[in-house]
Image (cartoon, helix red, strand yellow):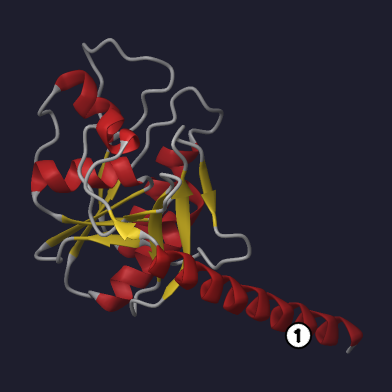
Amino acid sequence: MRIDALRRQHSEEQRKRQSDAAVAALIRWTAASPVEAHPYLSSKGVRAYGIRVEMNDTLLIPVRDAQGRMHSFQAIAFDGTKRFQPGGKVKGCYHAIGQPRGKLAICEGYATGATLHENTGHAVAIAFNSGNLLAVAQALRAKYPGITLVLCADDDWKTEGNPGLTAATEATRVVGGLLAVPIFTGLPRGEEDTDFNDLHRLAGQAVSA
């Protein structure tokens, strides 16, 4: 019984932290401004989709659930450093680009998602990290039962266990989707070249529907 009580207390405390974080995130989001140009976007060769910028040039990417409620954000500093709003809910939440029609791509990072959208025209859900791919895929399968979900993996070829590809493969299996993997054959691939944005940078218009 004591274990159950401790679990309930932990759950309540977590909900309180997440609720407080959502309020704090919304305040910062409301105070930020729409963005068109930013050094991070330029370095990645992508445009801005539904994101904002603070006065210190920090980009804010909203983290929303499948009902559109904002729970947190991913902040990208001028130097590219990424951080979430402390205490905010991320699991099962994502940033959406475009309106789903036929296919919906799911990926990890903003630059990857923007690259996929710009080169395929498909809507994209950005899960922010490999550990969130399955939860996001399940949330989107529930929201769009008839749509084709395409899990666009990061090929973490230099990381033990290849977490990006492993997580995308598992999510594909669970939700009955399709798996897309960037192929760097014949390109001067560096150790940190893992995703479709890297592929696009190395090969130009290599990302297609």
Q: Residue at x 39, y 78 (%)?
A: 69
Q: Residue at x 61, y 76 (%)?
A: 20
Give the residue at mark 1: 8
Residue 127 shown left or right of residue 124 in the figure: right
Q: Is residue 191 above or below residue 199?
A: above
Q: Quadrant of the N terminus?
A: bottom right
Query: In the rendering, at what x and y percent does residue 29 appear?
Result: 41, 65
Q: Residue at x 79, y 83 (%)?
A: 9
Judge the density around disc 1: few (<14), some (14-19), many (≥20) Cα neighbours within 10 Å: few
Residue 196 shown left or right of residue 81 in the figure: left
Is residue 129 visible from the viewing direction of this image? Answer: no
Q: Residue flagged by tag 1: what amino acid is it?
A: Arg
Question: Nearest the camera: 115 or 209?
Answer: 115
Query: In the rendering, at what x and y percent does residue 126 appear?
Result: 34, 54
Which residue in the rendered view is the most extreme toward the right? 2
Which residue in the rendered view is the most extreme toward the front? 55
Q: Secondary structure at mark 1?
A: helix
Query: In the rendering, at what x and y percent does residue 35 appear?
Result: 26, 51
Q: Is residue 87 above or below residue 12?
A: above
Q: Quadrant of residue 112?
A: top left
Is residue 78 visible from the viewing direction of this image? Answer: yes
Question: Nearest the camera: 203 or 52?
Answer: 52
Q: Residue at x 33, y 46 (%)?
A: 110
Q: Quadrant of residue 160?
A: top right
Residue 37 shown left or right of residue 94 in the figure: left
Q: Quadrant of the C terminus?
A: top left
Q: How many marks?
A: 1
